[in-house]
Structures are given as C-alpha cells and as structure tokens.
C-alpha cells in the first residue's frame, strides 16, 4: 500500500487530504509540525510527501532542502501545497527539489490525480 505523509499546520487541510487519500486506498500519516518531521519521515518511508511552505518553527522550503540533502530521503517526491502563489515562490520551490507546486485553494480531486500520476494508485 502506498504511503503519503502530509505536513500542514492547518487541521482542516490535514483532515480533508487524509480523508480523500484514505478513501482512495492510501496509507496516510499527518503531521502538524515540520520541526521534528525528518525522523518520522525516515521511519515511515513514505512514497510521497505533501508539505505546506508556511509552517511555524521550520518552513516547508527549509524542510524540503533538508530532505533533498539527505541521501536516504532525497528521492521521495515532494508536493508543495501552499498559499504562496507568486511565480518566484514556485521557481524557488522547484529549484530546491519540489516535484509539484500546488497553490491553495486547491481541488482535492486534482490533488489525488496528481498523486496517482506521481506514484501510482495504491
């Protein structure tokens, strides 16, 4: 079963994505903080990470940089799900290894389709 880790400080976003992905058959791990995410990601070995950019303590882009610098975690696709909709933000995300850049508000159905395109159906 494919596993997705979702990291966002907004409980509603976490709940909405978790519900959509679980109904589609994915195993989902949700985190509301990015600061301690690396050991959890290392332990869970997800097939894909969905990450918010604007997080307290450690931004999503900084976490992305950490993951891409770690040989064990660098190959995990990262979808940046963010309210930062400027082209410069998207370019910065892609420069640092983001696989897909998705702006909020977003369509859960489209997100599911992108995930299935990236890692296949569960």
Image (spheres, rainbow, N blue to C red):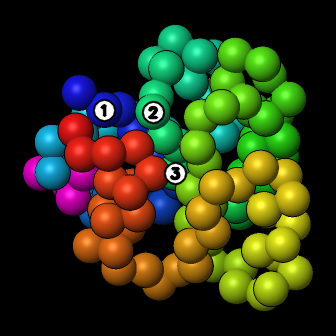
For residue 119, side relative to residue 71 (left or right): left
Q: What number is the disc on residue 2? A: 1
Q: Position of residue 39 (x, y in %)?
A: 63, 16
Instruction: Based on the picture, tell me whether residue 35 belongs to the magenta stretch.
Output: no
Q: In terms of sequence position, does the residue under pointer 3 or pointer 1 come before the other?
A: 1
Label 1: element kind? loop
Q: Residues within 10 Å of mark 2 (few under 14, many from 20)?
A: some
Q: In terms of sequence position, does the residue under pointer 1 or pointer 2 come before the other?
A: 1
Whether residue 53 is visible, yes or no, is: yes
Q: Position of residue 83 (x, y in %)?
A: 63, 78
Nearer to us: label 3 or label 1: 1
Q: 103 or 122, which is in the foreground?
A: 122
- Magenta segment: 18-23
Residue 102 sits above or below residue 44 on the image? below
Q: CA distance from mark 3 to mark 1?
A: 14 Å
Which residue is label 3 attached to? 50
Q: Position of residue 73 (x, y in %)?
A: 67, 24
Q: What number is the disc on residue 47? A: 2
For residue 58, side relative to residue 18 (left or right): right
Instruction: Based on the picture, tell me whether residue 19 belongs to the magenta stretch.
Output: yes
Q: CA distance from mark 3 to mark 2?
A: 10 Å
């Amino acid at each position: 079963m494919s596993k997705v880790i979702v990291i966002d400080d907004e409980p509603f976003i976490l709940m909405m994505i978790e519900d959509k992905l679980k109904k589609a058959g994915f195993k989902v791990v949700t985190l509301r903080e990015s600061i301690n995410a690396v050991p959890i990601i290392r332990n869970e070995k997800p097939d894909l990470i969905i990450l918010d950019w604007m997080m307290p303590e450690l931004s999503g882009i900084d976490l992305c940089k950490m993951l891409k610098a770690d040989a064990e975690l660098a190959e995990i696709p990262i979808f940046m799900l963010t309210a930062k909709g400027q082209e410069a933000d998207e370019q910065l995300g892609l420069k640092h290894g983001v696989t897909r850049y998705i702006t909020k508000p977003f369509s859960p159905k489209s997100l599911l389709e992108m995930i299935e395109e990236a890692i296949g159906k569960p």
